[in-house]
Image (cartoon, coloured by chain):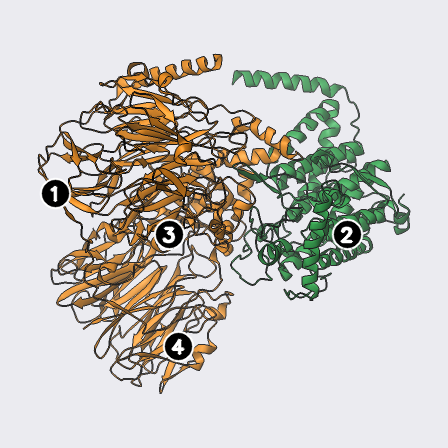
Chain colours: A orange, B green
Amino acid sequence: MKYLGGLLMLAFLVISCNKEEKQEQSYLFNELDSAVTGVDFMNMVEDTPEHSIINYIYFYNGAGVAVGDINNDGLKDLFFVSNEHDNKLYLNKGNMKFEDISASANINGNSDWNTGVTMVDINADGYLDIYVCAVSGLLDFKGHNELYINNGDNTFSEESSSYGLDFKGYSTQSYFFDYDKDGDLDMYLVNHAVHTNLSHGKASLRNERAPLVGDVLFKNDDGSFIDVSEDANIYGGVNGYGLSATIADFDNDGWDDIYVCNDFHEDDYFYVNNHDGTFTETLGSKFNTISRFSMGSDAADINNDGYQDLITLDMLPWDEKVLKETEGDDAMFNMQVHLSNLGYKDQYSRNMLQISHQGQYFHEEALKNQIADTDWSWAPLFADFDNDGQQDLFISNGIPKRPNGLDFKKYVSSAFKGKSEAEGLNWLYNAIGEMPDGNVSNQIYKGINGDFSNKTGEWISNVPKISNASIYTDLDNDGDLDIVTNNFNQVASIYQNNTSETNSINVSLKYKDQNIEGLGTKVELYNDRERQLKQVFKSRGFMSSIDGSLHFGLDSSIKVDSLVITWPNNKIQTVINPTINSSIQLVYDESNIKDGQESARQETAIFEKSNLIDFTHVEDRYNDFVEEKLIPYKVSTMGPAVAVGDVDNNGFEDIYIGGASGKSGQLFMNSGNDFKSVAISSFAADAAYEDNSATFFDADMDGDLDLYIGSGISEINAETLNYDRLYINNNGDFIRGTNAIPQNPMVTSTVNSYDYDQDGDMDLFVGIRSNPNSFGKMEASYILKNDGKGSFSKDPNFVLNGMIMDAEWTDIDNDGIKDLLVATEWDQPKVYLNKNASLDLINLPQELSGLWQSITVADVDNDGDQDILLGNLGLNSKFNLYFDGPLQLYYSDFDENGVNETMIAYNRNGTYYPLNTKDELAAQMNIINKIYTSHAAYAGKSMVDALKSGTLKKATKYEAATLTSGYLHNDNNEFNTFVPFDSSLQLGPIYDFESFELGNNKQLLITGNTYRFNTYHGSYSSLKGYFWDVSNDTIVPASNKGLDPINEQIKDVVIVDMKDNRVLLVVANNDSVKSYQFDK
Amino acid sequence: MRFTYRFLIITLLILQNCNTKTEPIEISATDYHKAVDKLTEIMVHDIFSPPVASRLYVYPNVAAYEVLNQNDDYFKSLSGQLKDLTISETTGETQANKELAALIAYMDVAKELVFSKEMMTDFRDSLYAEWELKNADSFLKSKSYGLSISDQVIKWMNKDGYAESRTLPDYNIYDKSPARWEPTPPAYMKGIEPHWNTIRPFALDSASQFKPIRHPDFSLEEDTPFYKELKEVYDLNNEIREKGDESVEIAIARFWDCNPFVSVNKGHFMFAEKKITPGAHWIGICKIACQQTEADFSRTVFAYTKTSMAIADAFISCWDEKYRSNLVRPETLINKYIDLDWAPILQTPPFPEYTSGHSVVSGASSEVLTDIFGDNFYFEDTTELPYGLPMRVFESFRAAAQEAAISRLYGGIHYKAAVVEGLSQGIKIGELSNSKISFFKEKKLASTGQ
């Protein structure tokens, strides 16, 4: 008790400190003084040898908070869960004053370790009941989940057993919803696993239900809850580290779906409701990138497209020092291969913002929105905090001690030798104090048309603390949403929202039967601005539940045209012109409803899937990252080569698709109706080559098309197997020419033919990405001049050293002669005007260095001339998190051992820091371990300070000043203005712009994605393909017109005319070719 | 500033004062053992892989040995005997206290090899201070002589291919052949030192001089030799586990574990449980033998030098084979094809299976130690006491080597072929070491040991 007093004292001190700061700065949200509000709850958790982070991995997860009007007086009351002490219930007395009625309410809790809480009217008697989860059966924790039935007089009776809800296990949180549409509330219970030898096994373990640990779906059978998990296809394995779920009707089919966040290696689950009491788990096909240590989650329609989007939280720190002191995704290099062998998906330790495409698939864009790194984060809450009609985002944060500190791991290792299990655990317990602290400020973001702007420090204080469970609600009925957090060993926070001069409307619902709160009801609000969609569910964020009303911000709009309510039975009721700036209750009115209709938003599919080309590209096992350990991405997986040309002169274009090293390329002959693969013996003989790029052209002037193939890195990286090849067409057979072209051992990225010197024969531009053994060195690309007989030599007048990714001959100045466009990485794109066989480099805007992946032309601004389209890396990469200035790449022999290394530095507030961790650098440079014996010593070191002094000056430096894709506006053949593309086209790297016409409209199909990056980044596969109708300047997802969403790393999209229609081929790295037919 | 100056002046006064009394600096074998132990301690702290650790042991010993034996009546310099090693132009040998100089050279080389250099320099500086107080003149002269040799050893050491090997490729984990080694639970560390065969050896002509016969051909057919050996590991481990923690097999397996990479899972944590390496264990045995025979300083340095060279060669030879055969560990196959939840009694170390490193090292060490101290040399092996393991008693070095080798089968981390062939590979290395490098000016005296 003395201890408690001390803590309270401390808390008061903290509060008074905060107070002083408040005087200096005012925030949108005031954090209220507990002495004034009367809410003095503190989730007090004490490390003891019996219970600590050492023997319970979720010891620092905190406990829940729930809000709801338990006495129906119009004021929302607060319930706080205490992990190991008494829960508390505070009655709202108005004006932000609360009364602690815990002593008389009988809600203290009988379990030894309490977790999440949900307020829900389980018996539909008009009074909110309270369901509190518990961990039982772990360590010496006893008890069970408890259901406090509201007696209607501010007292409660624990009746979990009579409802069948006295579950004993490792529960995190309960989610009430009516999954089978029988009019009563069922419940999905998220339970968590703990580490055992078994829990690290195969992914398929999720199929075997494990007691205590596996999630449970309870069906409400006349007031009695029955476990139907097995029948409903709900996973419940020993590897299910469930920390939260989000319930929403993601696909608007009228039936509620479930997303479950799992910590550690287990994938998250996405259960689609089958309308028959069962679910189908479809995470693998609907999501590409998911968070690894998934914690809290929430869903909301953040882009006002009528479909709910999803956020899942993780623990990527933003502080430079913390980043380098704690374990990150770079350490996953081997582990990820292992986990993938066990059947798990690649996962990355960062927050994920999953944008719904009509619930059919999701693309991830937290990096683009810069909300990916909020540190040790628990509860995300989407809500309109400033009443501007856009969803904002609050994220609670912090952990008392960071168990993933790298120096701590080393410290433990040093002292741990020779200890028995029990001694070891005891020793570890005593070492808890050595773990790095994890106090971090909560984060808040203002939503702006689907983007987010960080308002921490403006809307709320940025003072570090530890907040776990969180809710929003209008506590003072002033028309804006306040925030409440349950803090760890600190007094709970109430953030009072001071938004004014904007309008809002608060909608509560009264439904029927056993679901009188109307959980699952969707309300769409229409006004002069936009449509907003919200759905009623209680449990949101992390371990917490909000009240059942929906809060819509209206900004300055003074009128709501209508509210369209879709009730849980999918009947629709419409309210015209509801009163704004008020709380209104919508009551289900049988006489005033109509049947809902299936949402038919799908545009007509123009493209029809076909199976015209049977080709699968299979990458070889060459691994750049074991050869050069510090490089950010591979240059060995840039295929397959694609060449299009009418080889047999039958009027229809044929196609060559290259193989990766070890697999032969194939020639597909087009009859006008179909494609037939023809066997070419020289292609088979050269299967060991990696085909990166190819072009059909008449090399020897004999009237048929020959084939030049630019080679990448062969599987064994043998120099002669990296050479480019020229195949001469001999009556339809292709014979490899000898000595006609110079030997090229470099990584060829692009080959492009044109008679650039106008001497009547075809010449070639050969673009080089790099030396196979040295990522960071700029090598010479060249032009091969044809001597008129099919023999080629380098044009000595053309000099281009760079990292070339793409090139095109095209006439940009309308003089009838094609000019040369070149896309380069870590450099400016190059535009050469062709003046009488002299290629003159023209000036481009200075700041245009980038990671350019593709280049072409199109008149995208409809002014009659060709603009230069430039595909960059895009803004949805980890580089985007630290981009306060150009990205730098240094190339030098940093450790002076005769071999050059490549290092990347990023700019944060004007200072450059090395991207790599100490361990990564040390793997390539032994000297790093001698300079830095601890991670702390290295963490936070700038690029200049990190290495031996003077080292950096000697290095060659390249920059990427922009990662944005866009176009160079053609202004009378001058290209001085770079115009960024629409935000949707920044979701990933762009590898191809395919130009064609639909009707009379000019279209571009824009595709990309990459799987070339290391585990620090992960795959970037959010660019699912977009059609840009240039004539109408509209951009729509490719899936709207019948293409599958594109998850692969696209090499090329090709459109070929057939006799009766056209065919569109999508050619990707390490995947099968997809074909679609469409009308001419 | 002023304070510093004053402090310096006072210190200088004291030093001058001390210079007046000259006490002889006596360096004993115990001092050398302490320096070797210090190096072991730093290596355990820094976590070096077994091959790298073997390199760390050998060069400081060579430096100390050379300091002692440029013009010794009895021991012969290694200069000209080891590839590219020529010691020339030494300064002040005649005025130096050679034992002192040898110890100084040892520490000077050792500090260049570890990560936590300051741990070695702190140790050195406190000794320096002590010696300087005792006899500054002798100390400075000995230091100058010692460093003149260690400088040359460091230059030679730096050209052994180690620096170049740092930039060579990692082991490629993407190969899917079932016979090919892949990272093992629980930490799935990458393969350690895939290019250790590029390091310059000592007695060996080349890394592949004692290339062992090929391991039984990989097969998962039940009656093939390979599969039988796989099954043997599985069955034997289960049998031993059944016998329980008190069984002699488990005691043997744990005693010789010597895996510096053991990862431990506790709650949220996975971390390395630090241990010494196989090389360090045999260095420990060398120390025990020296102490037991009351070897003087010179003989102690000789014994460490000879043993550490054989160990270094053993790792070069063994790693050459490991990344030639790239054979998969039993744990990987058993988990895949026999028993998903099986784990070996010892944790599988992070490199390919064939041959067993501990077997090669033990074979080589036991041969050279037998050459130095004689066969049937009874000793009590207390090397693992600081790591929480009890003492074990052996009748001879060779008996210890036999046990070390078989311990890997008991531990469930090697097939029998790796143990048998590894031991024989090691014995050949030890024999070569004994015959090829002469430490004595008169070979006759060598075998009698005195």
In the rendered image, residue A932, in percent from the top left (x then y), is placed at 53, 37
Rendered image quadrant of residue A674: bottom left
Q: Is residue A371 above or below residue A459?
A: below
Going by the numbered disc 1, the residue's amino acid type is Asn
Apparent side of residue A542 relative to residue A336 in the rendered image (left or right): left
Marking on residue A726: 4
How far is disc 1 from disc 2 in space, using C-alphas? 93 Å
Are the residues flagged by discs 3 and 2 from a single subunit? no
| Subunit bearing disc 2 | B
Considering every residue shown, the one lying at the far front of the view is: A222
The disc label shown at residue B417, or none: none
- Left or right relative to A913: residue B385: right
In three-dimensional space, the C-alpha distance between marks 4 and 2, rounded to whole angstroms, equals 56 Å
Q: Nearer the viewer, mark 1 or mark 2?
A: 1
Whole-angstrom CA distance, mark 3 to mark 4, is 45 Å
Q: Nearer the viewer, residue A31 or A517?
A: A517
Marks 3 and 4 on same chain: yes
Amino acid at dot 2: Ala
Badge 1 or badge 4: first in the primary sequence: 1
Please state which amino acid type lies under the numbered disc 4. Answer: Leu
